[in-house]
Image (cartoon, coloured by chain):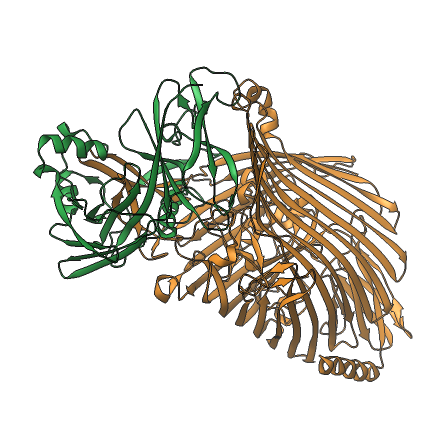
């Protein structure tokens, strides 16, 4: 602000509402699709400091998690990190962006262990969770995939700089249909992160073939030096995970992004638009493709 | 409609033939500048109950018995004048009143001390503040602000710390009709609403009507803020200006033809970033700048004793430019209002005053990004063409009738998005919406007896959404001007006054209002980017009823004026965004609306000291404001953002000497409601917040004290050039009032630890300022 602002820590009054179930689950189809999985937790009280115990206690165990594609129903199996062998731990930890050797949370997921579901484009996937007498349901749809046409690195805009690059992506959006996209990226491997504008709908570019600049998630945080904002470093290896998603999945991630960006003096609160009945969170269908390139031009 | 007109003409006929006395009419003006005086009192010395007040153009008409009579003319801060006349026929008398005392000593009152106008009149919840009163009060950064002064009155609460936005009796910010020389001002704030767009040097009068809105006004549910610009000195050239902490201003006025016509040009501009330009040029952000300005201009000319023409206009802009040449990046954010009003006053006879107005106003907002081959732009706004005529008829001392007709063509541009990537052009599918709004009104201020008065009014309104338009419901295509949807409303208004004794009265009133244009904000305050939308096939008009009653008592020979008013408001078809609304600028916002109801009630207590070295007021309001939306939390009744249980203002100025005047403001209000974070959860490795019930907690109470000193080195100087210094301290005891609350997460999921904290942020510490004002003539 223009004036010398002053901030103090503040403790809101405690909530009088009990914890809610939180679902985060995905079914993916397409290139290198990950096996369907779901994380089931409970919300944590909004208070000062959390330790491993609170995290571990937030996982909901022994739930019956079933997913149906209309023809077959698959029950997911609960697997906790501590139960895995070292090799599996390493794979799973990397997938979620952790280092297996020093991870202190025993996080648990419900997994289609035998990969029986085999998600496919154009299918709907109904979720039903039964736990402690409660029922949680949701449904998601995997749309037909619309891939990126291509992507290439270009010199950064403005002053010449041979250590930085911008990423130009090319997309041909199909006309006369609503398309929703989720975009994630990683640098030199590791977990995929959403960047700024990590979800898009085609209201603005329906049916167009066009070029756009994809910002680097790692350099598009608020506190990054404006000279490198959104840019890539020459020599890095960049992977872009490009997903077509359904409207409900778009709405969830769109509200996540808006809530994150919309914290400030004039902002109102934003409730995330969940597609979960009996809880909050997201049950999302993705059809995905990957583009990987070394940053160079 | 035919019935209303028949009634009107019957009334006029009988009232006209019933009179046998003669009429004295004319204008009341300031003798030095020739400015007409609005709301000046004119009454018979022998019987003060026979009297009237001048209208918006300074015109009066009073009918009194033939023979030798003495008529008193009075206006606050001016020497009263008594005219002795021998009435044998109708007479036209223009009166010039002399400023009686220095401005610093002006009583804070809208009435003359001889009368108990606040007690006798039928008006409720109506306060007029001459701008000179506003100028002696402390101000944030020394910027005299009309709208912030209004917030110090009971029933009016601030939209937020330092904000010029305000809420009246539990109504939304869009429910205030803000008029500048009859033109609607759609966005009244500069710099995200911290300063209002009204340059006090160009303003003559500000009237707030929060209760009994007369039938002459319409289109908003909560209040009317009627602001008149100065006309300009028609006696001599003069100038005034000032240099403050953030802006400089200059006003020039003078006669076009002495006693017949005058002009005024007034400008204000901020200069802080301009001064910083040499330093900014050395950074990576060369070319970055921000400023706002206002330019007011007005001229008037009296063509004959019966005809006068006014032309006035305003243009104001905020201009933010952020440039990063090294990244080939440019961001521009210009927005602002423009208004123009052409008016013709004509006197058909001594009893019938006529005004014809042609009004234009335009509010534009734009955001533009450019980088290399990419361009993105969002533009929105409102444009009105309006024509109206108004008659003021003074058939007898018992009646004062007003009637008129208004027609307005609206063009409301939602967020229209355009952009390009190289040769590929993008555009959103939303298009401007059009509407025609009509209003016909009739009102009579009827003095049934010396102890009982009634103001009856009826306003008939109609709004038509017209094409070009493509229906969002059935896809039907409407051509330009073709009617899509029609709404109409009959809005009765009635206000009663029973005078208990010369110093006390009881009043009651009922007001029905309909609002066809809406501004729905998703932020905690209204912002320039918020979009006005019309009533349409998707959005019903907002409707409201207000019931009010009050007791008015003047004490100690009118040294003290007191009142207690209570009100209850019922609001239908209120609008908000649906839960989980995301402003992505490319969809029709109407599809994101949900509709509900509201109610507000409260009591307002007001004590004002009008005379002496110390004057000022204390206003206290206890109130509640709720909304119920079936689609928000399953219809749970919740307090609005505007809900303030307690709201106290203490305003005083003290005339230490002719050189030194002190100003003092203290405000206290119950903390604003907010929606608290309730719990957290992890999604994709990041914390998300789950919120509790809407507006279920409050910030701490808000309180603040401001003080000012106005020092006039040579108050008695005979020189043409005079100046004074204003030293102002905002938030004198450095209260850290919370402006907003935010949450911050720090986590190390690898280690299984996280810290979640909420912070409250205050933005205005103690802020001293100095302003130098000057004037020559």
The answer to whether B660 appears left or right of A277 in the picture is: right
Q: Nearer the viewer, residue A87 or B643?
A: A87
- Who's the residue at 56% across and 69% down the image? B552
**Residue B245 in the image: above or below residue B163:** above
- Who's the residue at 13% across and 48% down the image? A77
Q: Position of residue B265 (x, y in %)?
A: 76, 42
Residue B618 in view in this figure: no
Q: Position of residue B266 (x, y in %)?
A: 73, 41
Q: Nearer the viewer, residue B280 or B660?
A: B280
Q: Position of residue B310 (x, y in %)?
A: 80, 53
Q: Nearer the viewer, residue B387 or B717?
A: B387
Q: Colour of chain A?
A: green
Q: Which quadrant does the C terminus of chain B fall into?
A: top right
Q: Quadrant of residue B469?
A: bottom right
**Residue A253 in the image: above or below residue B505:** above
Q: Position of residue B346 (x, y in %)?
A: 85, 63
Residue B414 in view in this figure: yes
**Residue B358 in the image: above or below residue B772:** below
Q: How many marks?
A: 0
Q: Colour of chain B?
A: orange
**Residue B680 in the image: above or below residue B126:** above
- Who's the residue at 66% across and 75% down the image? B457
Q: Which quadrant does the N terminus of chain B fall into?
A: bottom right
The answer to whether A186 appears left or right of B448 in the picture is: left
Q: Nearer the viewer, residue B97 or B224?
A: B224
- Who's the residue at 56% across and 20% down the image? B279
């Amino acid at each position: 602000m223009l004036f010398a602002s002053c901030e103090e820590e503040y403790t809101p009054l405690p909530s009088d509402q009990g914890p809610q179930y939180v679902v985060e689950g995905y079914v993916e189809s397409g290139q290198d699709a990950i096996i369907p999985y779901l994380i089931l937790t409970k919300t944590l009280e909004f208070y000062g400091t959390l330790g491993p115990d609170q995290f571990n206690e937030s996982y909901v165990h022994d739930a019956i998690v079933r997913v149906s594609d209309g023809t077959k129903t698959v029950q997911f199996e609960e697997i906790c990190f501590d139960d895995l062998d070292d090799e599996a731990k390493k794979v799973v930890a990397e997938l979620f962006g952790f280092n297996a050797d020093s991870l202190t949370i025993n996080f648990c997921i419900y997994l289609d262990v035998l990969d029986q579901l085999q998600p496919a484009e154009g299918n709907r996937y109904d979720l039903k969770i039964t736990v402690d007498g409660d029922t949680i349901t949701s449904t998601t749809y995997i749309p037909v995939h619309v891939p990126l046409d291509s992507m290439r690195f270009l010199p950064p805009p403005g002053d010449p700089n041979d250590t930085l690059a911008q990423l130009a992506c090319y997309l041909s959006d199909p006309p006369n249909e609503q398309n929703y996209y989720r975009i994630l990226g990683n640098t030199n491997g590791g977990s995929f992160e959403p960047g700024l504008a990590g979800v898009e709908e085609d209201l603005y570019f329906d049916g167009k073939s066009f070029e756009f600049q994809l910002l680097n998630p790692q350099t598009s945080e608020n506190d990054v030096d404006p000279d490198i904002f959104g840019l890539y470093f020459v020599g890095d290896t960049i992977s872009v995970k490009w997903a077509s998603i359904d409207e409900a999945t778009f709405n969830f991630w769109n509200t996540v992004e808006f809530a994150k960006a919309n914290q400030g003096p004039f902002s109102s609160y934003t409730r995330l638009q969940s597609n979960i009945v009996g809880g909050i969170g997201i049950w999302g269908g993705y059809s995905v493709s990957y583009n990987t390139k070394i940053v160079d031009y | 409609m035919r019935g209303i007109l028949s009634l009107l003409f019957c009334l006029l006929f009988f009232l006209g033939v019933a009179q046998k006395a003669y009429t004295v009419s004319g204008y009341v003006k300031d003798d030095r500048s020739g400015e007409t005086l609005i709301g000046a009192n004119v009454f018979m010395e022998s019987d003060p109950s026979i009297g009237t007040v001048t209208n918006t153009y300074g015109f009066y008409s009073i009918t009194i018995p033939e023979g030798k009579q003495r008529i008193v003319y009075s206006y606050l801060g001016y020497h009263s004048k008594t005219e002795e006349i021998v009435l044998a026929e109708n007479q036209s008398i223009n009166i010039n009143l002399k400023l009686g005392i220095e401005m610093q000593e002006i009583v804070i009152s809208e009435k003359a001390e001889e009368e108990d106008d606040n007690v006798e009149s039928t008006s409720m919840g109506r306060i007029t503040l001459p701008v000179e009163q506003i100028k002696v009060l402390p101000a944030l950064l020394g910027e005299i602000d009309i709208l912030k002064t209004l917030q110090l009155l009971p029933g009016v609460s601030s939209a937020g710390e330092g904000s010029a936005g305000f809420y009246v009796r539990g109504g939304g910010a869009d429910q205030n009709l803000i008029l500048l020389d009859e033109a609607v001002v759609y966005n009244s704030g500069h710099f995200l609403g911290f300063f209002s767009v009204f340059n006090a040097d160009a303003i003559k009068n500000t009237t707030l009507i929060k209760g009994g809105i007369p039938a002459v006004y319409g289109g908003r549910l909560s209040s009317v803020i009627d602001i008149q610009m100065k006309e300009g000195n028609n006696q001599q050239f003069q100038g005034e200006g000032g240099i403050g902490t953030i802006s400089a201003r200059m006003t020039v006025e003078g006669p076009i033809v002495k006693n017949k016509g005058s002009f005024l040009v007034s400008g204000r501009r901020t200069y802080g970033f301009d001064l910083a330009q040499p330093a900014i040029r050395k950074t990576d952000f060369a070319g970055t700048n921000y400023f706002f300005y206002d330019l007011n201009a007005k001229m008037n000319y009296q063509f004959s004793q019966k005809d006068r023409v006014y032309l006035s206009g305003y243009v104001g802009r905020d201009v933010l430019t952020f440039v990063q040449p090294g990244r080939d990046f440019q961001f521009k954010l210009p927005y602002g209002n423009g208004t123009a009003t052409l008016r013709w006053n004509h006197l058909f006879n001594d009893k019938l005053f006529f005004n014809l107005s042609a009004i234009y106003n335009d509010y534009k907002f734009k955001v533009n990004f450019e980088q290399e081959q990419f361009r993105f732009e969002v533009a929105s706004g409102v444009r009105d063409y309006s024509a109206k005529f108004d008659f003021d008829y003074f058939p007898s001392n018992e009646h004062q009738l007003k009637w008129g007709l208004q027609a307005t063509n609206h063009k409301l541009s939602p967020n229209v998005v355009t952009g390009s990537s190289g040769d590929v052009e993008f555009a959103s599918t939303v298009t401007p919406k059009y509407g025609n709004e009509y209003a016909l009104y009739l009102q009579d201020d009827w003095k049934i007896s010396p102890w009982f008065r009634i103001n009856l009014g009826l306003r008939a309104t109609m709004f038509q959404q017209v094409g070009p338009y493509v229906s969002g419901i059935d896809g039907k295509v409407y051509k330009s001007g073709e009617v899509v949807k029609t709404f109409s409303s009959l809005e009765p208004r009635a206000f009663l006054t029973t005078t208990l004794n010369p110093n006390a009265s009881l009043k009651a009133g009922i007001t029905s209002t309909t609002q066809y244009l809406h501004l729905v904000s998703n932020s905690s305050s209204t912002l320039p980017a918020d979009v006005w939308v019309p009533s349409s096939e998707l959005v019903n008009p907002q409707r409201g009823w207000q019931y009010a009653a009050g007791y008015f008592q003047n004490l100690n020979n009118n040294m003290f004026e007191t009142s207690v008013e209570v009100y209850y408001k019922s609001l239908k078809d209120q609008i908000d965004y649906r839960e989980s609304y995301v402003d992505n600028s490319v969809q029709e916002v109407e599809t994101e609306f949900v509709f509900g109801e509201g109610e507000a009630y409260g009591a307002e207590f007001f004590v004002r000291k009008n005379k002496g070295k110390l004057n000022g007021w204390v206003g206290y309001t206890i109130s509640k404001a709720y909304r119920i939306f079936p689609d928000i939390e399953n219809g749970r009744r919740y307090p609005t953002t505007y809900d303030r249980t307690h709201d106290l203002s203490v305003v005083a100025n003290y005339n230490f000497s002719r050189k030194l005047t002190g100003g003092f403001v203290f405000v206290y209000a119950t903390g604003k409601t907010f929606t608290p974070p309730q719990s957290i959860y992890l999604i994709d490795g990041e914390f998300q917040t789950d919120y509790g019930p809407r507006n279920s907690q409050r910030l701490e109470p808000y309180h603040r004290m401001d003080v000012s000193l106005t020092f006039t080195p040579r108050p008695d100087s005979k020189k043409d050039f005079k100046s004074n210094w204003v030293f102002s301290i905002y938030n004198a005891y450095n209260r850290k009032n919370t402006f907003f609350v935010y949450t911050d997460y720090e986590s190390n999921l690898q280690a299984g630890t996280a810290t979640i904290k909420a912070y409250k942020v205050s933005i205005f510490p103690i802020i001293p300022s100095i302003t130098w004002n000057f004037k020559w003539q």
